[in-house]
Amino acid sequence: MDEEIQFIIDSVEEKMASAIHHLEIEFVNIRAGKATPSMLSGVKVDYYGALTPLSQVANVNTMDAHTITVQPWEKSLIPEIEKGILVANLGFNPMNNGESIIINVPILTEERRRELAKKAKAEGENAKVSIRNDRKDGNNELKKLEISKDQLANAEVDIQLLTDTYSKKVDELYLVKEIEIMKV
């Protein structure tokens, strides 16, 4: 019986860790002012009729804090890469020098920084909701087991401790991201 309880607690922890991982991915996609290759991670390029991630047809690097360079492996792909960047609707205007594509990342305004901080806060709240749902699901699974009230109470306390730990981790990740966004 203890194995079943531990299995439920472990699966709840795994789901909560997955929520944190998802939050980290979402935070990477929220721009914080300086140029990073991950800003173009969602860009798809028409590569001989198939939509292909940009990273599979070109090298994406940063020259400085405000410039991204895209060096295609085939020069014939330059127009398709430009089109893919525009279609991705990232707010970037790619420039083509015949050899590669250069993207100037504009400096964020104060208003835009606040919007991005709100977006990060919303993503953090979504992660917390997911964590609380995982707690609820775990507690419901525990109640289906035929265990004593003491065992149930102890297992629920363990799940609540996990919930508190992962919720605190969400808050910590948000604070780091907010500082990164608001830094000029």
Image: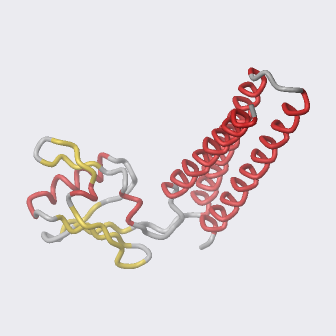
Position of 81 with respect to 98 (left or right) is right
Outermost residue, right direction? 150
Choose between 149 and 129: the one closer to the eye.
Answer: 149
**Residue beneath the point at 66% across and 37% down:** 7
* As drawn, 178 above or below 23: below
Spot occupied by residue 153 in the image (x, y as percentages of width and height): 88, 34
Q: Quadrant of residue 71?
A: bottom left
Choose between 88 and 1: the one closer to the eye.
Answer: 1
**Residue beneath the point at 63% across and 39% down:** 11
**Residue beneath the point at 19% across and 69% down:** 100
Choose between 152 and 128: the one closer to the eye.
Answer: 152
* As drawn, 157 above or below 85: above
Position of 177 with respect to 65 (left or right) is right
Position of 34 with respect to 43 (left or right) is right
Q: Quadrant of residue 134?
A: top right
Spot occupied by residue 116 in the image (x, y as percentages of width and height): 59, 54
Q: Pick the quarter of the image with the C terminus.
A: bottom right
Q: How many marks?
A: 0
Spot occupied by residue 159 in the image (x, y as percentages of width and height): 77, 41
**Residue beneath the point at 24% across and 57% down:** 56
Q: Pick the quarter of the image with the N terminus.
A: top right
